[in-house]
Amino acid sequence: MKLIIQIPCYNEAETLKIALDALPKHIDGIDVIEYLIINDGSSDNTVEVAKEWGVNYVVNFRNNKGLARGFMAGLDACLRNGADIIVNTDADNQYCGEDIEKLIQPILRGEAGMVVGERPIDETEHFSPLKKKLQHLGSWVVRKASNTDIPDAPSGFRAYSRSTAMRLNVINEYTYTLETIVQAGRNKMAVTSVPIRTNPELRKSRLFHSMFGYVKKSMLTIGRAYMMYRPLAVFSAIAAVFGAAGTGLGIRYLIKRAKGRGQGSVQSLILSSMLIIIAVLCGVIGLLADVIAGNRKLLQEIQFELRKMDYGLGHEAQKKMDQKIIEEEE
């Protein structure tokens, strides 16, 4: 069983060695542990620090492409290098490296394909009261959108089985954390969480520059991801709102007309007709989007099969096959 721990990095020379030193070198049930960094266009000596420490792989971007692109590039590199389990952690040593052993246990036991580390948000000193409330609110929204029970959706401390990692796709360029939970939940993947510890803050977060920007981007990411997997539900709800408003105005007009006062309410009739037309169009768009979503599922299955052929067997599967060959030769 091979574990690769990946770390997205952007100008992390000051903290990277601290994070790497905290990573486990041995875990029961794991034969090989390797380390990978994604250099997202760093202008400092992040890569030199990583190589001097002894990381096994470096994924290098010349320009900064963002956390989501870096995460997917890291998954791709881990899969190509035979990872059976992939753990994603941060270069600022936010998460306790010793908890990686706890993080991967549900995968080793075959209980889940994706495990999210649940931070002690309310006990984290460097989180402001507003940020704590927004973290809880955002996680609640993701739970509703994804139909999962993950208590800490923004957490980047995660573990993925090989099969689950090959099924993941991230469309947005902001962050992978929210979209992958919605995707996993709506695709009926086995997702769970485990409580983990955090370390004192070494630097300020670089993912967002203001709380308003964070909330706006997070809500857009969640909404977009939910629309991708439940388009009919979204457009049906919109159609229901416009349809109800249009029908209500239409009934109001008919009542007034029955009482002989309909001449002064022609505007209500026109508005009612427009709202009902919009409702019908939203319903049609929802049906078309649902058909497209069905085709996307087929394409994802095709992509999964192509990835299996492209990435080849994982370390564990290859080991079993080698053993089988040895036994047959004997």
Image (cartoon, rainbow, N blue to C red):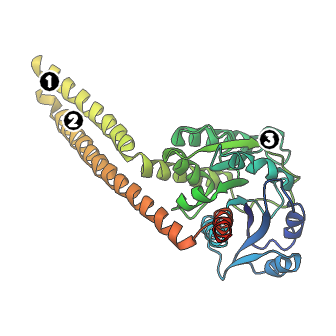
- Under circle 3, the secondary element is loop
Identify the residue shown where x is 68% and y is 65%: 323
* Residue 165 location (% of width, % of height): 59, 59
Q: Which residue is mark 1?
A: 254
- Amino acid type, mark 3: Pro
Outermost residue, top side:
259
For the residues labelled 1 and 3, the Cα–Cα distance comes to 58 Å
Point out the image quarter for the C terminus. bottom right
Q: Which residue is mark 3?
A: 120
- Under circle 2, the secondary element is helix
- Under circle 1, the secondary element is helix
- Mark found first going from the N terminus, 2 or 1: 1
For the residues labelled 2 and 1, the Cα–Cα distance comes to 11 Å
3 with respect to 97 (left or right): left
- Amino acid type, mark 2: Ser
Identify the residue shown where x is 43% and y is 52%: 228
